[in-house]
Amino acid sequence: MLSLSGALGQALGCALALTLVACSRGPSPAECTAMLDRYTEKLVGSDRPDVKAGDLEKLKADARARAAEDPEFAECTRKVSRSAYECAMQAETVDRMEICLN
């Protein structure tokens, strides 16, 4: 039979393990796509600041289509950490995003 202190210790250990797993999970596929969109927006914004919104949406769609065929992009959910994802999503430039992801 498990004592009260043993049960509390076991529960605390389980809670800590779950917290670590939840905090260390990578981005979801939708988050990876959102990060690609943000990267495309920042890249186009720096290279072609006068691009129209419709053209930007087309460029993002093209980037998504290329990414869908790229085995490296398919690894985003496994290779990008939660902290790298959050850093990249808050970065104000493409260069900063790349620093976050490398």
Image (cartoon, rainbow, N blue to C red):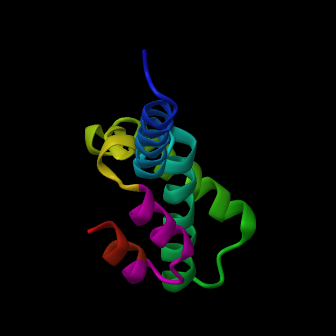
Residue at the extreme right: 53
Looking at the rendering, the stretch of residues picked out in magenta corresponds to 82-96
From the top left corner, tell me how far across and down residue 101 is, in percent: 33, 66
Is residue 56 a member of the stretch shown in magenta?
no
From the top left corner, tell me how far across and down residue 88 is, in percent: 46, 70
User: Please, is residue 54 above or below residue 45 in the view?
Assistant: above
Q: For this view, does 57 lie left or right of residue 80? A: right
Q: Quadrant of the C terminus?
A: bottom left
Question: How many labels, in total?
Answer: 0
In the foreground, 57 or 15? 15
User: Please, is residue 52 above or below residue 81 in the view?
Assistant: below
Residue at the extreme top: 1
| Residue drawn at 40 percent across, 82 percent down | 96
In the foreground, 23 or 55? 23
Is residue 90 a member of the stretch shown in magenta?
yes
| Residue drawn at 52 percent across, 31 percent down | 4
From the top left corner, tell me how far across and down residue 17 is, in percent: 40, 41
Q: Quadrant of the N terminus?
A: top left
Q: For this view, does 95 lie left or right of residue 88? A: left
Q: Main secondary structure of the magenta part?
A: helix
User: Please, is residue 87 above or below residue 50 in the view?
Assistant: above
| Residue drawn at 49 percent across, 57 percent down | 36
| Residue drawn at 48 percent across, 47 percent down | 19
In the foreground, 2 or 91? 2
In the foreground, 36 or 10? 10
Q: Quadrant of residue 41?
A: bottom right
